[in-house]
């Protein structure tokens, strides 16, 4: 269960047409039956496994050049924590990861040596500037055993499916956020235009409200100021 190869695969899945791409405004989301409730121990194993994968960090630290994508990524991170995202993914992950395999992988992910390696890798990969102590010789031995374990190898074989699940879940959430923001922006524009119409006779300027999302705020402000000038 080598973190660098897993992280590369996750980043590729998220970046190519995935959670780092602009979702369609009206996303085509299939309606599926809600997954059955999981046994508490099974659910905890799945969420702990997700917590030990750097999929969320891949999104947070990825270099995103396009303004809308970057703003949406930052908005996503403010609204949805890794724990919340893992809770959404866990029931679907159960369709990929059997309970016995999940228990074995979760035990490895919870090991302090694994957590130490994850922290060090994210600090290096994300260029966080955080200083993390190097792995000890004992930790290295433990990690070699974990990486060569049969359950870890089986888990690595399932990573393409897990990456697809993570990408589709993040795409779906982003599409929902994208639609919510668009509707909120349009409502704000309509309200602003109505308020401007009421005060046009007095010539008094009004405060133009925004929604806290840069790309839409620029449009709202531009339309509001333009309307004020021409009235």
Image: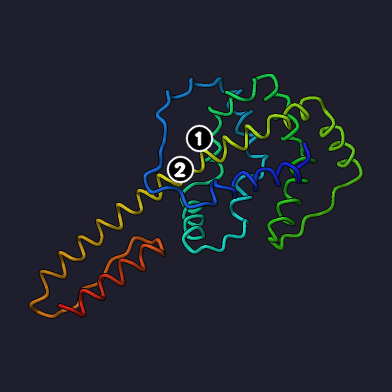
Q: In the rendering, at what x and y percent does residue 107 appear?
A: 73, 29
Residues at circles 2 and 1 in contact by the CB criterion of under 8 Å: yes
Q: Check the image and report above or below for 49 versus 134.
A: above
Rendered image: mark on residue 173? 2
- From the viewer's side, name the closer residue of 112 and 207: 207
Return the x and y of residue 161 as percentages of the image width and height.
63, 32
Secondary structure category for the residue under label 2: helix
134 relative position to 165: left or right: right
Counting every numbered tag in the picture gives: 2
Judging by the rendered image, the residue that carries numbered circle 1 is 88
- Between discs 2 and 1, the one toward the N terminus: 1
The residue positioned 49% from the left and 43% from the top of the image is: 171
Q: Quadrant of the C terminus?
A: bottom left
Q: With 162 as the anchor, is 3 left or right in this view?
A: right
Q: Nearer the viewer, residue 131 or 49?
A: 49
Q: Which mark is residue 8?
A: none
Q: Residue at x 53, y 47 (%)?
A: 19
Q: Residue at x 16, y 70 (%)?
A: 196
Front position in the image: 184 or 51? 184
Percent coordinates x, y for residue 97 in the rendering: 64, 24
Q: Is residue 199 above or below residue 128?
A: below
Q: Which circle, 2 or 1, is nearer the viewer? A: 2
Residue 99 drawn above or below residue 152: above
Q: Which quarter of the rendering shows the N terminus?
A: top right
Q: Residue at x 15, y 64 (%)?
A: 194
Label 1 packing within 10 angstroms: few (<14), some (14-19), many (20+): some
């Amino acid at each position: 269960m080598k973190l660098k190869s897993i992280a590369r695969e996750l980043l590729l899945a998220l970046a190519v047409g995935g959670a780092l791409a602009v979702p369609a405004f009206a996303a085509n989301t299939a309606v599926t039956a809600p997954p059955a409730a999981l046994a508490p121990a099974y659910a905890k194993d799945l969420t702990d496994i997700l917590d030990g994968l750097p999929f969320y960090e891949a999104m947070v630290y990825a270099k995103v050049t396009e303004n809308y994508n970057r703003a949406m990524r930052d908005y996503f991170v403010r609204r949805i924590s890794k724990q919340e995202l893992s809770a959404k993914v866990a029931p679907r992950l159960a369709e990929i990861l059997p309970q016995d395999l999940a228990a074995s992988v979760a035990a490895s992910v919870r090991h302090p040596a694994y957590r130490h390696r994850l922290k060090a890798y994210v600090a290096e990969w994300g260029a966080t500037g955080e200083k993390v102590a190097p792995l000890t010789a004992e930790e290295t031995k433990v990690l070699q055993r974990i990486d060569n374990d049969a359950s870890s190898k089986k888990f690595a074989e399932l990573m393409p499916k897990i990456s697809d699940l993570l990408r589709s879940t993040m795409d779906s959430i982003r599409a929902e956020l994208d639609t919510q923001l668009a509707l909120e922006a349009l409502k704000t524009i309509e309200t602003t235009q109505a308020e401007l119409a009421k005060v046009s006779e007095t010539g008094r300027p009004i405060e133009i409200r925004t929604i806290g999302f840069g790309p839409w705020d620029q449009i709202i402000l531009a339309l509001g100021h333009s309307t004020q000038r021409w009235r």
